[in-house]
Image: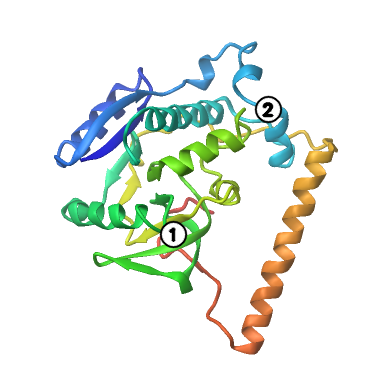
Amino acid sequence: MLKTYIVNLKRSVDRREHILKETARFPFLDIELVEAVDGRELPGEEIPRLFDTEHFMDRYHGRIPLMGEIGCTLSHRKCYRKLLESDEEYALILEDDATFLYPEKMASYYEACRKLISGKADVILSSSRCLLYTYRRQRVNGFDFYPVHTAFATHAYIINRKAAMKILQKDELPSMVADDWYAIRRMGITIYTPSPELFFTLETLNSTINFSGEFKSTRKSRRYIKYRIYGRYCQFFYLLGDILGFLGNMRKKRFRISRYIDKSNGL
């Protein structure tokens, strides 16, 4: 059995009905509904205790976090805590708009993930918006799994206890979006993504997050500057590595855009 946490807002009845109908087809999924945190209903005085807004703005170029993003992050942290409080070694986390692309492959996909999550991977992420390391491909049960450099999306992923604990410890007072997989990878967490992708989000269900955001461009804190310098440092060495690899014909291209990038809404 695969422990499965489904993140759902109490008021989102249509989304709950959708995901329960989707998962009912798979008897090996042990379903538990997790009531999502509605960021828009959080009292303003409670937010500093639950979320580090100042650190978030340093991370993301002065952008003010959306209340929906805060709620999303806190909701996924609830799932991580539930995993650590259980006897399970890993769990599948689904958002309530996830849809199975190839339901007939789910049983073999589960077996492949079980083998990979028990060895090389800490997170197995379903995402059409990612940059991959193609030269370290793992082939398991007929599926190709690629290490992730960076990715976005949290609608479907398997996470183990080690990764859940590291995220909660290293970002104790949350300061990032739930799908900042680049920052999560920098915590020492190994992330893989499968090909083909087996989940996508149902576009007919409206998002519960409003994606327009405000920026405060005048931030000059030491932490803000540190993030900007580190970002430029990484970009320089990634570019240098690609140039040397190309000129010397020593290795294959380092990154590959996901073949499903056309679904990524303009990324």
Disc 1 marks which residue? 262
Q: Residue furthest front?
A: 87
Amino acid type at circle 2 is Thr
Residue 101, horizontal then vertical, whole percent? 26, 52
**Figure check: 113 above or below 80:** below
- Say whether residue 253 is left or right of residue 29: right
Q: Where is residue 36 in the image (x, y as percent from the top left)?
A: 41, 24
Secondary element type, mark 1: helix
Give the residue displayed 41% in from the left and 65% down from the top: 259
- For mark 1, does the 10 Å Cα neighbourhood hold few (<14), some (14 to 19), or many (20 or more) residues? few
- Give residue 22's quadrant in the image: top left
- 177 or 99: which is nearer to us? 177
The residue furthest bottom is 248
- Residue 137 higher or lower than 25, as above or below: below
Mark 2 secondary-structure assignment: helix
What residue is rendered at 58% in x and 11% in y? 43
Q: Can residue 102 be seen in this view?
A: no
Q: In which quarter of the image is the N terminus?
A: top left
Quarter where residue 5 is shown: top left
Task: State the separation of the CA atoms marked 2 and 1.
Answer: 32 Å
In the image: residue 154, left or right of residue 31: right
Viewer-proximal residue among 79 and 266 = 79
Quadrant location of residue 128? bottom left
Quadrant containing the C terminus in the rendered view: bottom right
Q: In this figure, which residue is indicated by the disc labeled 2?
A: 53
